[in-house]
Image (cartoon, grey):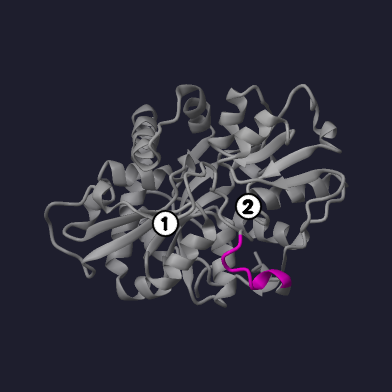
Amino acid sequence: MPATRITLRRSLAAAAALPLLAVALTACGYGSEAKDDTKKANVSSGGKKLSADTVKIGYFPNLTHATALVGIQEGLIAKELGGTTVKPSTFNAGPSEIEALNAGSIDIGFIGPSPSINGFAKSKGKSLRIIGGSASGGVKLVVDPKKIKTLDDLRGKKIATPQLGNTQDVAFLNWISEKGWKVDAQSGKGDVSVIRTDNKVTPDAYKAGSIDGAWVPEPTASKLVAQGAKVLLDESTLWPDKKFVITNIIVSQKFLSEHPDVVEAVLRGSVNTNAWINANPDKAKASANAALKELSGKALPPEVIDPAWKSVQFTDDPLAATLDTEAKHAVQAGLLEQTDLSGIYDLKPLNKILKAAGKPEVADAGLGVK
């Protein structure tokens, strides 16, 4: 598969801290600042220290980041690191996590495809690599059933997405385009009004009637359903095999070069965590919710977490072909121009781990390091 070539438009390139191509996963909206969660990490009490004293891991307090939530909560990542300490930090915006990675404040991050693309493109391919998968799915179009009964009824309605250019925003703009409708990507005005709304206020906006629905990740979608909204479309139905990347794992190229043993250990912990989640879904759901309660001060109620959890798939495969497609959708939406994504993936450490475990290796869709 040929590498997608994309570059941020000049009108957007200067906005490093703006929400352009921000993480798909601002779903919970538990705040906007990075949070140091070292005191909550399960750090190995013994074992041989690897080449780094600590590894700083960033992620979101979000169900689609449950690999990190559960892996840290249950000590499954720390277990692989011996005497090397896990230092976790949480974020709620893709640009913030990318900035932290570039500054060395974190070494490894769980993050969505759009900020991964954005960070790689802005650094001209020098800042990060995607080294593994984490989650697929967990995105839905939910609507007010009194106003919208079919997909065609979306015309003329106000539909929220989390941020300008974030993964859900791009997906919705692409869906609108495929319907033959017109919307200006920057303003959101057109046959459908695309309202960029922070997920932490989307439920209130829906309750107030200022939006008619939303194309959002979990658990925001299930929060709206709990308020009476209806799921009109699950984004997974638009993808081959109903799979698309929603969360992947990135690493700074500097850290990967200097501490490959630590990167492999974290990846082993991630693979083991995904296996534990899939083998113990109820325990894993409870563990993720407990982590969310610690991070946000409030656990998700059963009517929200139960349906939300079922819609997310946890996978080691970064589903590289779908990231390539998402990048092309951003180009078609008018949010991106051309740049080279070749080398955004380095899946050699992950495939080494998978092979040793007797699991099938994963592909980089032609976008791996040579």
Q: Amino acid at mark 2?
A: Thr
Q: Residue at x 52, y 44 (%)?
A: 29
Q: Quadrant of residue 108?
A: bottom left
Q: Would residue 168 appear left or right of 306 to someone viewing this image?
A: right
Q: Is residue 14 magenta?
A: yes
Horizontal side of residue 187 vs 326, given as left or right: right
- Residue 349 in percent (x, y) is at 37, 63
Which stretch appears magenta?
A: 11-18
Q: Quadrant of residue 88?
A: bottom left
| Magenta stretch: dominant secondary structure | loop
* Chain-order first, disc 2 or disc 1: 1
Q: As rendered, which of 206 and 237 lies closer to the eye?
A: 206
Q: Is residue 235 visible?
A: no
Instruction: Find disc 1 in the rendering and name its residue.
Output: 34
> Does the rendering let one see residue 343?
yes
To which residue does mark 2 refer? 167
Q: Give x and y (percent) for residue 340.
A: 63, 74
User: Is 370 above or below relative to 295?
Assistant: below
